Every structure is written in structure tokens, then in C-alpha cells.
Image: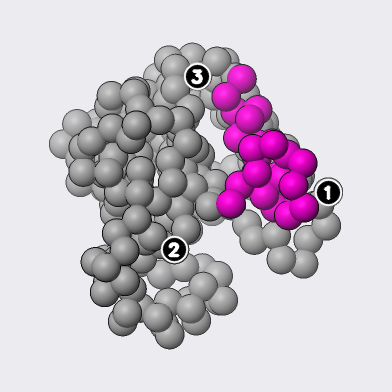
Amino acid sequence: MNVMIFGATGMVGQGVLRACLAAGDVDKVLLVGRSPLKLEHPRLDQAVLANLFDIQTIGERLSGYAACFFCLGVSSAGMTEAQYTHITYDLTLAIASCLAGLNPAMVFTYVSGVGTDSSERGRTMWARVKGRTENQLKTLGFRGVYLFRPGIIQPLDGIRSKTRAYRLFYSATGWVLPAIRRLFPGSIVTTDDIGQAMLNLARTGAGRAVLEPRDIARVAKGSHAS
């Protein structure tokens, strides 16, 4: 199958990319982003677009894909609701709407977060915006839409976050995360778990639409979340 990834330079996206390139049934991986990734692989292609709102301009390169793994995201810290909505909701829906028209049989996987507010009426701004985004994605006509809500993510394989605050957090807690994960397997997922779970959902197109950490870990191992 052919898959595409948005946000492959981020911590989650790097994990998803590693899983895709290691998968024997993935024929082609298209990375779409604002800057190229310094990586070469015979199954890897890249589409660089300075403004991702202009996604329609590269429509001819976006057809024929079985899955989109959407790992783009920003922190809401310091943003107004309008600013955060423009990046989180408007951009995601602009891209997803384009892809749904080109690949109606596509599986679309969106990285959200624990605490996302599906009611869209809660007090937490980022959770409302994420909830609105999730709800709209489900209306676009994809074969399947899967909404990942990870909590703490343990980076593996030398992957590092681009966000300084997250790097400091992992530097301070990285040594204890594996132990916490063994004691409380439903509280932490790894970057590899997320990548494997996304691939398994693209393969089967079945299972729960909203995946919390325990669900992600289960699907990564090949079991459906129910």
C-alpha cells in the first residue's frame, strides 16, 4: 500500500515514518511538509509546500494512497483560540477535505490528545478545538477515520522532540518512563506503538474510531480496540 505522512519531522511523525519504512507491505511513503527531511530511501518521496493551505496545488501527487497519517500539531501555549483554531482546525480540514476528494477509500489517522473534548463545549480551549476537528474529520467520507489520543509518549530509536519543553521533560524523566510503562501499561505509549497501530488500522480498516493510550498499545500488537 501507499501511505502519506504529514508532520514527519515531529516526534510522533518520526516514529510513524520509521514504522512505515520498516513495513514490508508499504510500497511508497510520501512526506508532505514545509521543509524537506534529510533522508533518502528507495520507497520515500517528499513533497515540499511552503504554505500547506495550498495543498490543492499539488493534487496530482496526492492520488492513489491508501492511508494518511496526520501527525502535524502545535502547542496551544501563548495562542488565542482564533490562532490555535486556524492552525489546528482550519489547516487540518483544508488538507483532509482535499485528500477525501482524491482518495475516498483512504484511511485517515489524526493525532489528537488525551482530554480532547468531543462535546466542543468544555472550558479548555485546546480540547474544544481538537474535539471540533475530530468531529469534522468524521464527516468527510473517508473509508475510515481514526483519532489517536495519546498521553505520555516515550520516544524510542534516538527520536527527539522539536519542542524544547518536551525535550527537557524527556531528559528529566526518560530513565523512569520504561518502568512506569511496565507498571502501568495503559498510561504510556511509545513512538513505535503509534506507528505500528496506525499501520495496522490502515491494513484492516476496522476497530474503535477513538483510541486512548491503552487502545493504541493493543492495536500496535495486532488486536482491535473494542
- The mark nearer the N terminus, 2 or 1, is 1
- Report if the CB atoms under discs 3 and 1 are less than 8 Å apart: no
x and y percent of residue 182 in the render?
24, 66
Please give left or right for residue 117 compared with residue 179 in the image: right
Q: Earlier in the sequence, mark 3 or mark 1?
A: 1
Q: What's the CA distance linking mark 3 and mark 1?
A: 27 Å
Task: Please state which amino acid type lies under the numbered disc 1.
Answer: Ala
Query: Between tags 2 and 1, which lies in front?
Result: 2
How has the structure been colored for display? one colour
Mark-to-mark CA distance, 3 and 2: 28 Å
Count the labels in the image: 3
Q: Which amino acid does label 3 sit on?
A: Phe
CB under 8 Å between discs 3 and 2: no
**Residue 137 magenta-highlighted:** yes
User: Is the Cβ of the residue at disc 2 closer than 8 Å to that at disc 1?
Assistant: no
Magenta region includes residue 223? no
Vertical side of 180 occupied by 219: above or below? above
Rendered location of residue 8, percent (x, y): 44, 51
Q: Where is residue 207 in the image (x, y as percent from the top left)?
A: 35, 27
Residue under numbered circle 1: 82
Say whether residue 88 is visible.
no
Classify the position of the N terminus by image quarter. top left
Report crowding for label 1: few under 14, some 14 to 19, many 20 or more residues within 10 A (C-alpha).
few
Secondary structure under tag 1 reads helix
Q: How far apart are marks 2 and 1 (CA)?
A: 27 Å
Residue beneath the point at 44% across and 17% down: 143
Mark 3 = which residue? 142
Q: Label 2: which residue?
A: 152
Who is closer to the viewer here, 50 or 5?
Answer: 5
Q: Is mark 3 on a helix, strand or loop?
A: loop
Q: Nearer the viewer, mark 3 or mark 2?
A: 2
First to last magenta residue range: 115-139
